[in-house]
Amino acid sequence: MSAPDRSRPDRSAYRAWRTATTRWSDDDVYGHLNNARYFDLIDTAVNAHLHDATGTDIRRLPAIGVVAEVSCRYFAEMGYPRPIEMGLAVERLGTSSVIYRVGLFQGDADGEGALACAEGRFVHVYVDDTDPARRPTPVPDVIREALAPLVV
């Protein structure tokens, strides 16, 4: 097995995009984006894409995606007042799980914003929402169809 690519990704590594505004309260005492806000952005990029791409309320599906893992690698500082562009890609679309990569970019796409300031890894495991034990179940077809174009 080869080692994962740990280099700083550029915009070509992602397939879907959305923009988030920053707020004064997003910055910490040191004047850069608070660590917790990165995780909010990663979660928003994934779930907003699922909502928009499926046209359905994903919380109402019989199989729901629960977060099994989330992490973030930091490359450069971000902060208020500049917007953040969030790139989304699917690293792996399995039977009952999905591994996403979310790139966070700030700045001009042809300049300082060409490389990710951070990259999140986000894992959903689909479970049967009607089962009290919430056992893993296949990714719903509507989700699979929405994510197939994002697989890299």
Image (cartoon, helix red, strand yellow):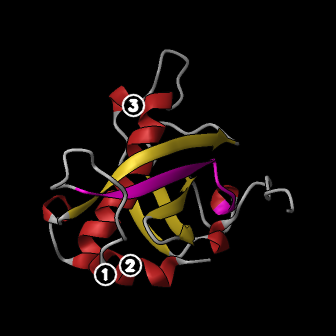
The residue that disc 3 covers is 26
Q: Residues within 10 Å of mark 1 (few under 14, many from 20)?
A: few
Q: Amino acid at mark 1?
A: Asp
Start and end of the magenta stretch? Answer: 114-128
Q: Quadrant of residue 136?
A: bottom left
**Residue 131: x and y, percent?**
19, 52
Q: Is residue 116 magenta?
A: yes
Which type of secondary structure does the marked residue at label 2 adopt? helix
Q: Nearer the viewer, mark 3 or mark 2?
A: 2
Q: Nearer the viewer, residue 110 or 59?
A: 59
- Give the number of the mark in front: 3 or 1: 1
Residue matched to label 1: 141
Of the pair 18 and 73, the residue shown nearer to us: 73
Q: Is residue 20 visible?
A: no
Residue 126 appears in the figure: yes
Few, some or many residues within 10 Å of mark 3 (<14, 14–19, 20+): many
Look at 49% across and 53% down and name the residue there. Answer: 123
Element type where label 3 sits in the image: helix
Q: CA distance from mark 3 to mark 1?
A: 36 Å
Q: Earlier in the sequence, mark 3 or mark 1?
A: 3
